[in-house]
Image (spheres, helix red, strand yellow):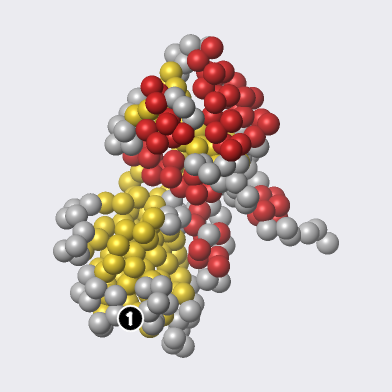
C-alpha cells in the first residue's frame, strides 16, 4: 500500500475535480490517501484530513493540484520529511509543474510502478531575529525570502552582511534572497538573472534600488546572508509569498541554503531551456 498526499488549489474547480478522481482511483487500488484538513473539507472528505503539522509523516508521495503557488505550499508541507512531489498543472503559468491534468492518472501509474526519477531543488532556510517573532523559528522557502517596504511606505534601508562581514546598506523598495528555482519568480520581475534550477547558490536582488549599485549578486549556498532593518522605516517579510509580519529597526533576517531539498518527481529528462522557452513564449529563429 502506498500513502499518497493530495494538496489542491482552493479556488480552482478543476483542482477539486482532479482530487476527487485521484481519491477514488487510489482507493480502488487499496492505497492510503491523505489531505490537509482544509483541503479534505473542500472536497467533502473530512475523513481523509490530517493536521498540517503531521500531514507529511509516512507519505510516499505528494500530489500538488494547482499552479506554482500550490507547489510552494506543498513544498513547505512535505520537504522536511523528504516526500517526493508530483506537480499537476491546474494553474496559469505552472512553471514548476511537469504533468498536465489529462495525464494525472498516468503519472500516478508510473510512480506506483517505479518508472520515474527524482530531481532535487535547493531550499532556503530563513531565520528571523525579532522580538515579535517566535524565537528559534526556521522557515523554508523554495523560491525566495523578501524584505520590502510596507504597501504605503517609502523606501527602506536594509544593511547586508555576508558570513558576518558587513557589505553595504541598500536604500530600496526591498531585497530578495532567491534560490535558483526562485530566479524565475519575483527576482526575475526585479530584473535578476535566470539560474538553472538544479544549480546551488543564493541570489541577492534589490527591488528598485535608490543607489548606483543596482546589480544582483550570486553567492555560494554555504554563505550566510544577514539583512538588518536600519532606520525608522519598517519592512515586511514574506517567504514564498506568505507574509510573516513586520520588522522594525534592529530586526534582521538570516538566509542560507537549507539542509533539506524539495524532491520533484520527473518522468524523463527535464529540458530547462525548452521549458523556459515554452513558459515565456520564446520563439526559435
Q: Is residue 111 visible?
A: no
What residue did someone put label 1 on?
Answer: 157
Residue 89: quadrant of the picture: top right
Residue 49 spot, x, y in % from top left? 38, 28
The residue closer to the viewer here, 196 or 5, is: 5
Residue 268 spot, x, y in % from top left? 63, 35
With respect to residue 98, does 246 lie above or below?
A: below
The residue closer to the viewer here, 8 or 11, is: 11
Residue 99: quadrant of the picture: top right
The residue closer to the viewer here, 269 or 140, is: 140
- 260 horizontally vs 22: left or right: left
Q: How many marks do you count on the picture?
A: 1
Q: Residue at x 65, y 46 (%)?
A: 271
Q: Residue at x 29, y 80 (%)?
A: 233
Please tell me whether mark 1 sits on a helix, a strand or a loop: strand
Residue 225: quadrant of the picture: bottom left
Q: Specify the quadrant that holds the N terminus.
A: top left
With respect to residue 83, does 205 lie above or below?
A: below
**Mark 1 crowdedness (10 Å alpha carbons): few <14, some 14-19, many ≥20:** many
Q: Residue at x 34, y 29 (%)?
A: 50
Q: Is residue 230 visible?
A: yes
Residue 162 spot, x, y in % from top left? 31, 70
- 80 horizontally vs 178: left or right: left
Amino acid at each position: 500500500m502506498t500513502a499518497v498526499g493530495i494538496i489542491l488549489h482552493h479556488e480552482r474547480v478543476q483542482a477539486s475535480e482532479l482530487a476527487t478522481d485521484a481519491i477514488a482511483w487510489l482507493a480502488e487500488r487499496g492505497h492510503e490517501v491523505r489531505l490537509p484538513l482544509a483541503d479534505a473539507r473542500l472536497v467533502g472528505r473530512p475523513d481523509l484530513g490530517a493536521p498540517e503539522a503531521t500531514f507529511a509523516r509516512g507519505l510516499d508521495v505528494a500530489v500538488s493540484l494547482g499552479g506554482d503557488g500550490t507547489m510552494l505550499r506543498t513544498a513547505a508541507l512535505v520537504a522536511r520529511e523528504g516526500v517526493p512531489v508530483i506537480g499537476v498543472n491546474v494553474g496559469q503559468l505552472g512553471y514548476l509543474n511537469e504533468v498536465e491534468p489529462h495525464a494525472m492518472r498516468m503519472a500516478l501509474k508510473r510512480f506506483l510502478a517505479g518508472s520515474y526519477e527524482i530531481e532535487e531543488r535547493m531550499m532556503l532556510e530563513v531565520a528571523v531575529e525579532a522580538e515579535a517573532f517566535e524565537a528559534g523559528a526556521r522557515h523554508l522557502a523554495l523560491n525566495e525570502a523578501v524584505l520590502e517596504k510596507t504597501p504605503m511606505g517609502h523606501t527602506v534601508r536594509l544593511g547586508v552582511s555576508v558570513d558576518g562581514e558587513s557589505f553595504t546598506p541598500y536604500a530600496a523598495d526591498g531585497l530578495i534572497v532567491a534560490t535558483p528555482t526562485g530566479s524565475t519568480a519575483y527576482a526575475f520581475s526585479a530584473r535578476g538573472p535566470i539560474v538553472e534550477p538544479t544549480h546551488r547558490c543564493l541570489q541577492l536582488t534589490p527591488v528598485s534600488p535608490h543607489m548606483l549599485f543596482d546589480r544582483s549578486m550570486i553567492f555560494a549556498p554555504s554563505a550566510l546572508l544577514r539583512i538588518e532593518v536600519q532606520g525608522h522605516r519598517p519592512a515586511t517579510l514574506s517567504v514564498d509569498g506568505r507574509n510573516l509580519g513586520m520588522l522594525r529597526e534592529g530586526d534582521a533576517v538570516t538566509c542560507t541554503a537549507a539542509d533539506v531539498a524539495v524532491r520533484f518527481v520527473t518522468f524523463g529528462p527535464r529540458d530547462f531551456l525548452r521549458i523556459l522557452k515554452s513558459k515565456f513564449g520564446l520563439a526559435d529563429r
